[in-house]
Image (cartoon, rainbow, N blue to C red):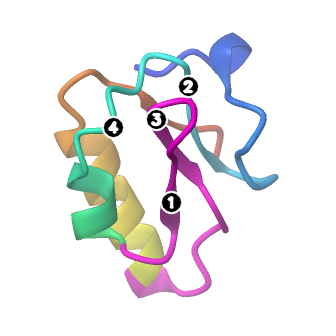
Amino acid sequence: MADPALRTPENASGRFYVDENCIDCDLCHETAPGVFARNEDEGRSFVARQPASPEEEALCREALESCPVEAIGDDG
């Protein structure tokens, strides 16, 4: 499970977030495009915007459950 204390500053405010353990594997971008984005300088992903629909929320949950390093969190 992602650590809320290690949330990266790029994350949009809200329920979903990415922490510093992200290895930028691209899985979240493929699963929920538009919600997750990449910080090229830091070599990690972040939540660019919170999901805007139940479908996007389900895709974020899928990304969270599939993350190989458990870097995606859900404060909801």
Label 4 Cα crowd, 10 Å radius (few <14 / some 14-19 / many 20+): many
Q: Tell me if label 4 and label 3 are in contact, CB under 8 Å.
A: yes
Q: Secondary structure at mark 2?
A: loop
Q: From the viewer's perspective, is the residue at label 2 or at label 1 nearer? A: 1
Task: Give the mark nearest the N terminus, 3 or 1.
Answer: 1
Residue depicted at 51% across the width and 69% down the height: 35
**Relative image position of residue 16 (x, y in whole percent):** 59, 49
Label 1 Cα crowd, 10 Å radius (few <14 / some 14-19 / many 20+): many
Task: Give the mark nearest the N terminus, 2 or 1.
Answer: 2
Label 4: which residue?
24
How many labels, in total? 4
Residue 65 lies in what quarter of the image? top left
Label 3 Cα crowd, 10 Å radius (few <14 / some 14-19 / many 20+): many
Task: Kindly identify the amino acid type of the residue bearing the numbered disc 1.
Answer: Ala
Q: Nearer the viewer, residue 15 or 23?
A: 23
Q: Secondary structure at mark 4?
A: loop
Q: In whole angstroms, how far apart are the C-alphas of marks 4 and 2?
A: 11 Å
Task: Kindly identify the amino acid type of the residue bearing the numbered disc 3.
Answer: Arg
Residue 60 lies in what quarter of the image? bottom left
Above or below, comparing residue 72 to residue 50 in the picture: above
Task: Kindly identify the amino acid type of the residue bearing the numbered disc 2.
Answer: Asp
Q: Nearer the viewer, residue 28 or 25?
A: 25
Label 1: which residue?
37
Q: In whole angstroms, how far apart are the C-alphas of marks 4 and 3?
A: 4 Å
